[in-house]
Amino acid sequence: MDEKKKNERKRMIAIHMIALVLIVGTFSTGAWFVFGKIVPTGKMRMAAVGANYEISFLENGQAGKFFRDFHAQVKDPYAVVWLMDDEHNVYNNNDNEIDGISPGACGSVSFYVTPKTDSVNLEFTFEILGYEMVRDEATGELTQELELLDKEEEPAIFLNGHILLFEGRSGEPDHYTYSGPVLSNDDFERVLRKTFPGSGGRQPVTLYWVWPQTLSTLVDARQSGDMDVTTVPITSGVDYENVVNNLTEHAGFFLKASDDSAGNGSASLGALTESEIVERYRLYGYLYDQADNDIGMSIRYVILKMSVAEVVPEGE
Amino acid sequence: MKKLKQYFLQLKMIRRVELVLSILCTVFLLVIFPAFAWFSYVNRMETMTKIKEPDNLDIKAGNFDQIINFEIRDVDIEKMVETGVSEYRVFSVSAGDYMISYYLQLAHTTNIPFTYKIYRATRLDEAGDGSGVTVQYHPLDNADAVTEYQFDPAVDEITLTLKNGDASNESHFGRTLAMRGEDTYYKRTYAENDDPEIYAVPLYYESERIIPTQKEKGDHDYFVLEIGWAGSPSDETGFKEWNKAVNNKETDIVLLTASRSTN
């Protein structure tokens, strides 16, 4: 009787093992299919999928030219590395330098949305995060390790006001005009909502990033009596107002607080107005440059991260 | 499969239910967890780049030598007035690889009635043609190493704007001295209870915006500081012999800085 029970238990275990192997095999194949899927063009990679949409991006077709070690070094383990072609990445700056960006650099990033229903409303949340090189505690030498900086503190907080995202760009490379700013909010995030009609098939989304050279590219200071300013801002109309309002509401994103470091008097960033900036442009321009300097001195890499979620359209 | 089916059919009903439930639970767990992980994985994308370190804006002596080679000692005032030839000193500015425009700033005390002008200069071994004024530079530690610079006074003068001059004292002192009291620059320089000597309060000048010369990266802009004398000896002011040319004058401090443009 005992022998019979033992045989029965062995059969039960065998059945479970077979079921387990079958299921694991099925899901592994499915996962490989999802992550390795190449759409028919042969140059697109699917990056994100929801019930009603797919996000895809241009796959790197140039033998890893734009995939650099630092992507693997610090990337969010839960995120897809956003590979772009040579016109659409964070290092396609206008200096044609591939060793990094500095004030004055600009470029674009792009991806594609494919709705699976009549219409899909998506909320894209962008963050720009900073990393610094870690020093060896014993020797004080810089290591190859990178550490994520606190996005609420200087200098990483300056990335919110010094690398800006826009939906549109026009003009010539030396005099681009930008429109549709996607500006950082209180949570240090830039949120963009867009509706994609299902009839559109695969629809491109391009964002333009710019690291403005000086404060006068954001605030029109040509009437300043404090300094001879000739720079024309990179935005106009409502877009200009939105950028300036973001600056005055979140001055800490753009300007390094200072008591008198410029020798130009103290600056109160708490109640900043456009007219105050214009009137004392020498001081505020300096504070903007100091924030740039902090970024350059303390941040070695920046990451542009995008997350996407389907949302209910506003008003419903 | 046939044996498995026979085995399944010969089980008691309670055993059959147990077996089906256990398989269903296994399937459920395997479905739920990979699907959750997959969704959390793919709703984010990221791209990354490097930040360049800030570029230096350096001001140095001629030939971009160390600043210690920029010196204004041994100015022969008597000879300067006699010959009418000013003294010249060469200095260099490097705008770095980013070639950002900048300002030159000049500040000096007013013990000695020198006048100062700045000219943009060309190093003769590079592109000069020998016209205009030619100035020699040599480092302090090697008098034989001479480099010539040239400029055209009519074309190459850098416009300097005086920020805090008080012209009203020219009638007495013969020259413009710095404003005091409620002047913005005075208040930024001195504390409320300070009482500096009138000639010790510096005059501040700032240049127009200077666009770096588009040369090879790492090359520099060159300038000549002209040190002149404030007019002919005169007793017309209430302050006698204010500009009499003698060499036993007191000391002045001259400060030259380069400041990156922010406009």
Image (tube, coloured by chain):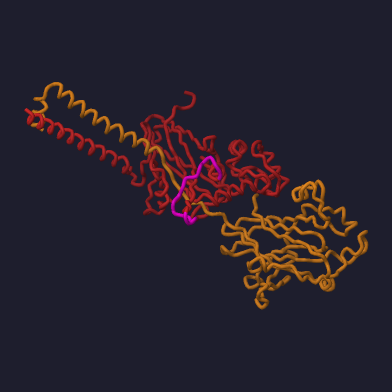
Check the picture and name the quadrant holding the N terminus of chain B: top left
Position of B52 relative to B137 (above/below): above
Residue A180 x, y percent position in the rendering:
54, 38
User: Which is more toward the observer, A307 or A242?
Assistant: A307
Label tally: 0
The reply to whether residue B21 is in sight is yes
Magenta stretch encompasses residue A146? yes
Locate residue A265: give its quadrant.
top right
Magenta stretch encompasses residue B33? no
Furthest residue to the top?
B13
Residue B154 x, y percent position in the rendering:
75, 65
Question: Chain B in the picture: what colour?
Answer: orange
Highlighted range, magenta? A138-154
Determine the residue positioned at 37% across, 51% down.
A61
Residue B38 x, y percent position in the rendering:
34, 37
User: Which is more toward the observer, B250 or A31?
Assistant: B250
Furthest residue to the bottom?
B144
Determine the residue positioned at 56% across, 42% down.
A161
Please give left or right for residue B180 compared with residue B33 in the image: right
Locate residue A280: give its quadrant.
top right
Please give left or right for residue B128 compared with residue B239 in the image: left
Residue A29 x, y percent position in the rendering:
25, 40
Question: Chain A in the picture: what colour?
Answer: red
User: Which is more toward the observer, A267 or A26?
Assistant: A267
User: Which is more toward the observer, A25 or A181?
Assistant: A25
Determine the residue positioned at 42% across, 51% down.
A70
The reply to whether residue A170 is in sight is no
